[in-house]
Image (cartoon, rainbow, N blue to C red):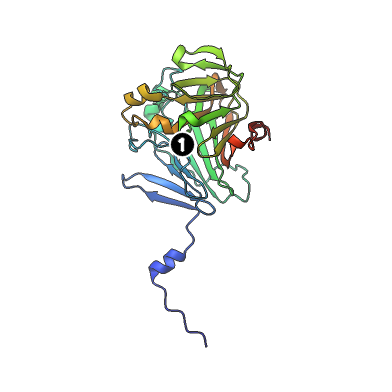
Amino acid sequence: MAAAAAPQSPQQQQQQQPSPLVERVKTAAGLEKLVLRGQRNCSVEISLYGGQVTSWKNDYGEELLFVSSKANFKPPKPIRGGIPICFPQFGTHGNLEQHGFARNRLWTVDDNPPPLPINPAIKAFVDLILKPSEDDLKVWPHSFEFRLRIALGQGGDLSLTSRIRNTNTDGRPFSYTFAYHTHFSVSDISEVRVEGLETMDYLDNIKGKERFTEQGDAIVFESEVDKVYLAAPSKVAIIDHEKKRTFVVTKEGLPDAVVWNPWDKKAKAMQDFGDAEYKHMLCVEPAAVEKPITLKPGEEWKGRLALSAVPSSYCSGQLDPQRVLHG
Ligand SMILES: O=P(O)(O)OC[C@H]1O[C@@H](O)[C@H](O)[C@@H](O)[C@@H]1O
């Protein structure tokens, strides 16, 4: 007769419980975050402060996003890294604070969002919502509902879907600019190339937002870069040569793409950014900057970001960026 199994302690029982696909936890700093768990060691963390993705890990539990070691995680400063939401203004394209106020606000979980079709295989996702406070209405006198769905796909892909609705009751339309201010973790910025933006026109933020045309056959990094590429393709590839990893950024509803690395001088000037951290990060930000988005009351805009990280032995030419970009 088989020996009866020894009774399990609650801890052992807990250990064997499968981790919940979506968990809400309080951080040490007393802030709330949500954890999405996928297959193997894939996970995503979202801070309710800012409605901001602050971690995206792959099968091996490797962190794929950059968050500064000196980041603030409490109001009023935004969290330096992950995927801040720039709304209702990108950068200094308007009279609000830089990048608008959405990333400096406490978002809430939307338990009953309007239906948004999702691949039924995706089980780990959360819906957040932001509405303007009385103070927000003083700086930006428009009522809106901003719904953000963050989903972790079966293969570890990360997607963010924003739905912004004009809920003005005074009949007034509103216009805004927007970006998913995505900070990628890279091994060494001097070993990184960006494919898909060559020959595109861009506004150069370090040359008075003047318009130029990209000349190179790929973008490489040797100094500060702060460019808004206009009417960019729906897919952009970030190739990390040293890590043999390619990030594929897919965007919908967002015509532009911002590429930013502060380099050494700007890095030293940011108190929530390590002096040498510019070497290990790159922002590629699907955005709507050149042509603000205008919504009439009742209208809703949808903008989507999909991220995947694929192995790339680019140096051996096995990864054809054109194939990655054009399927
Ligand atoms: O320090 P912030 O407000 O997060 O902005 C960082 C950078 O964000 C980038 O998106 C902008 O193009 C840069 O001009 C800006 O400096």
Up the image or down, 276 lies above or below 211; here it is below
Q: State whether label 1 is within 8 Å of ligand 1.
A: no
Q: Is residue 115 visible?
A: yes
Residue 4, x across and y down, in percent: 47, 83
- As drawn, which residue projects farthest toward the front? 316
Q: Toward the viewer: 63 or 288?
A: 63
Q: Residue at x 46, y 43 (%)?
A: 63
Residue 150, x across and y down, in percent: 52, 42
Q: Residue at x 50, y 33 (%)?
A: 145
User: What is the three-letter code of the residue carrying label 1?
Assistant: Ser
Q: Is residue 173 visible?
A: no
Up the image or down, 19 lies above or below 254; here it is below
Residue 273, x across and y down, in percent: 35, 31
Judged left or right of residue 16, residue 239 is right
Q: Quadrant of the C terminus?
A: top right
Up the image or down, 160 lies above or below 93; here it is below
Q: Toward the viewer: 229 or 109?
A: 229
Instruction: Give the class, few, some or many, for how many residues have Cα within 10 Å of label 1's Cα (few <14, many ≥20).
Output: some
Give the quadrant of ligand 1: top left
Q: Toward the viewer: 48 or 54?
A: 54
Residue 159, x across and y down, in percent: 55, 40
Up the image or down, 290 lies above or below 117; here it is above
> What is the total number of numbered labels drawn onto the structure image?
1
Q: Quadrant of residue 75?
A: top left
- Where disc 1 sits, the SS reads loop
What residue sits right under mark 1 in the picture?
187
Q: Residue at x 33, y 37 (%)?
A: 74
